[in-house]
Amino acid sequence: MTKWNIALGQTIQAVLSVTLLLISTTLCFIPILFIGVIKLIPNKKLQTLCTKAVDKIATLWIMVNNSYLNATKTTQWEIEGLDNLKRKDWYLVIANHQSWLDIVVLQRAFNRKIPVLKFFIKDQLKWVPLLGFSWWAMGCPFMKRYSAAYIKKNPHKKGKDLLATQKACATFKNLPVSIMNFVEGSRFSQLKKNRQQSPYNNLLKPKAGGMAYVLNTMGQQINSILDVTIIYPNKHRTLWDFLCHRIDKIKVIVRTVPIPTQFLKGNYFEDNKLQQDFRNWLNNYWQQKDKLIESHS
């Protein structure tokens, strides 16, 4: 079989997968649409019930997608560290970020093992058809990230990017939740790594603000941090590569990280020493994560 025939076959497989994904997403969106409209009613008990219902639909949607992937994909999965997780606990989940495929990986690893993941989502993604409204109905916070240069020119915007986190944390206290945060704030690339002069070989610099705020606000409620390291052993790591069967193996390492008690006290945004201590702790942990990726690559 020629390379052209192989590439054509892979493309057909990917197009079929995308078509089935769109069908399952549309079918699940129909009830979410009606539930989301009801959720607009300003009644906390009713809104909590709506969130529960949307979470159940999201769980079903992920199950359907995972079943299809298990039946049709040839990728070898190696997932470790899922023992002793509970669906009725609160978690802060952090992970390295390389492509949209990371979301598929996380959903496959955690579905029905912990509460449905609530992602920190870039504000502009709320306009994605179907998914944007679904993310809102699930209670996912939409984040407007401002660069240091932008804040310097517009100091009145300082802290605005965390307002969504504050509002979301208020609702997260009502139901068990898994708060998902890609700490790097962006997908890894060599260009981004060089631009920000990242000291890590496989990671961008971690952003402490959103993670620290969640711990500072909900630390007493969150049972632990789940640190997820996603490793793609070969150069193929995009969602399209995955749908085209170009990824032979995906390794996922989940580590349960105890929350340092000093970060559960005080006010992170007013205590400079607490801020520095948290950044040092996170940077040291990120260094360990970088070495872990190196050892499995």
Image: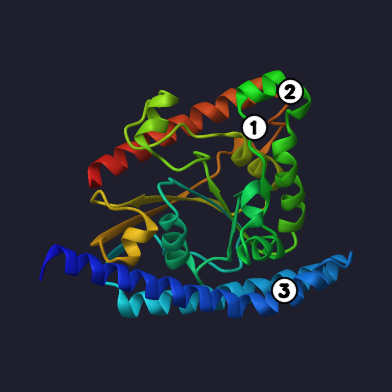
Tell me which amino acid carries mark 2: Asn
Residue 257 in percent (x, y) is at: 48, 47
Q: Which element type, helix, strand or loop, lies under badge 1?
A: loop
Q: Earlier in the sequence, mark 2 or mark 1?
A: 1
Query: Residue shown at 79%/25% (left/top)?
Result: 156
| Residue that sits furthest to the front in the current view | 4
| Residue that sits furthest to the left in the current view | 1
Q: Which residue is mark 2?
A: 154
How many angstroms separate mark 1 from mark 3 (CA)?
Answer: 31 Å
Residue 118 in percent (x, y) is at: 61, 58
Tell me which amino acid carries mark 3: Leu
Q: Earlier in the sequence, mark 1 or mark 3?
A: 3
Query: Residue shown at 64%/74% (left/top)?
Result: 29
Residue 286 in percent (x, y) is at: 42, 35
The answer to which image quadrant residue 177 occupies is: bottom right
Q: Which residue is mark 1?
A: 146
